Amino acid sequence: MVWAAALPFHLFPVADDMSTAMNSEEIYVRTALQRLALDEGAKRYVMGNPNLYRVLLAASRPFIGGEVRDEALACARQLNRAGHKVTIDYVGESSREHSVVDEAAAEFLSLADDLLKTDLYANISLDLSHIGLLIDPTLAVHHLCNIAGRLEDSGREVIVSAESFVRVDAVLNATKASLGKQRNIGVTVQAYLPRTGRDVQSLLSDSPALVRIVKGSFDPPLGAYERGEALNGAYLSLVKIVADSGTPVLLATHDPRIIQEVQAEIAGDRLDPKLIRFEFLLGIAEDRLQTARMQGRSTQVYITYGKEWFLYLCNRLAEHPPNLIPALGRALKAITDHQ
């Protein structure tokens, strides 16, 4: 799973990427949801309880492309018609069993094959821990190169998502090893880590297809930039470093302050608009997505599919607690419709 607002466990209790200050009740709800999203036992419980699964699936519907590949492809097609590129992720992470890793790798290859049969402007995103990183990094490299190789001649990319800060070195090392074999691989970096500037300089020497920049995902380590001017400054600095190298930048944030600043840099001819792509999450900040597209910017929507959507739902609700009310309404409707 992917990025700034998108990926799990931001524990900065000040303001989220929707740029709304949180009251104490919202902070409490957010923290509780973040902790729930960390609980793999809770995910297994939901997936093993058909009634609970059905109800929570209804709550998650606006944020996911579907449970199966065909639903995600239909969602991608609709977004393409609206003028947006897409990146598709078969959702899952932290896989520790070979059978699960093999199934995920096979599904990504099938997704790649389906994309080759279409004219969809769609890339693939994935977590390396979904395809073997926690078992053996060379296994993840093997699967990543196979998936990227399947798409190479079509001009599509495979974007490696960010994971917990404790996995940064493992993810970057595996990505760099893969870039030595396949050129159509992008990488995600996290602006809240002070080390990221150095990491980006190192990555650029390996010529990634693009660099996706997120604010910060997962439980922040000590020393991480807190949300506000310092983090936004670090983010914008990374945008400049990557763009100045001639490498495409994927702006993975809903923060209007960053979006506006980048727009101003483009308008002032200080950033090449051909190198900048604005990425939004499905069902989030749709007004900002449409505005960016109407202004002639390249836009992309990140969509997920699969059955492991529970952690993703928790993250969507945690980043913007007011989303809880409509989600609760969808869940209650699923209960009453089933009666």
Image (cartoon, rainbow, N blue to C red):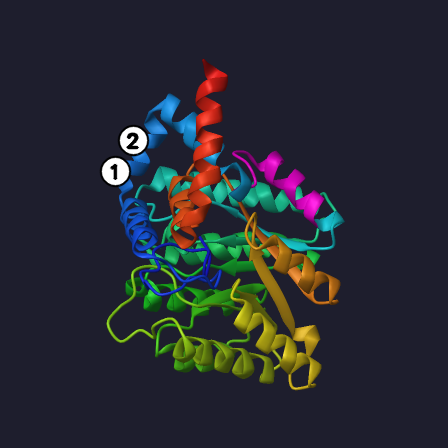
- Mark 1: which amino acid? Gly
| Secondary element at image label 1 | helix
Mark seen at residue 139: none
Residue furthest to the top in view is: 339
Residue at position x 61%, y 65% from top? 278
330 on left or right of 261: left
- Mark 2: which amino acid? Tyr
Residue 214 lies, in percent from the top left, at: 46, 66
Question: In the image shown, does 42 or 56 lie closer to the viewer?
Answer: 56
Q: Which residue is mark 1?
A: 41
Residue at position x 59%, y 85% from top? 244
Q: Quadrant of residue 218?
A: bottom left
Query: Do callouts 1 and 2 mark residues in contact (Cβ within 8 Å)?
Result: yes
In the depicted structure, whether residue 220 falls above or below residue 314:
below
| Secondary element at image label 2 | helix
Residue 84 visible in the shown view: yes
- Residue 276 shown in magenta: no
Residue at position x 60%, y 40% from top? 72
Q: Quadrant where the C terminus lies?
A: top left
Residue 265 lies, in percent from the top left, at: 63, 82
Mark 2, other Cα within 10 Å: few <14 / some 14–19 / many ≥20: few
Q: Which residues are magenta?
A: 64-79
168 on left or right of 303: left
Magenta stretch: helix, strand or loop mostly? helix
Residue 330 lies, in percent from the top left, at: 49, 31
| Label 1 to label 2: alpha-carbon separation | 6 Å
Q: Which residue is mark 2?
A: 45
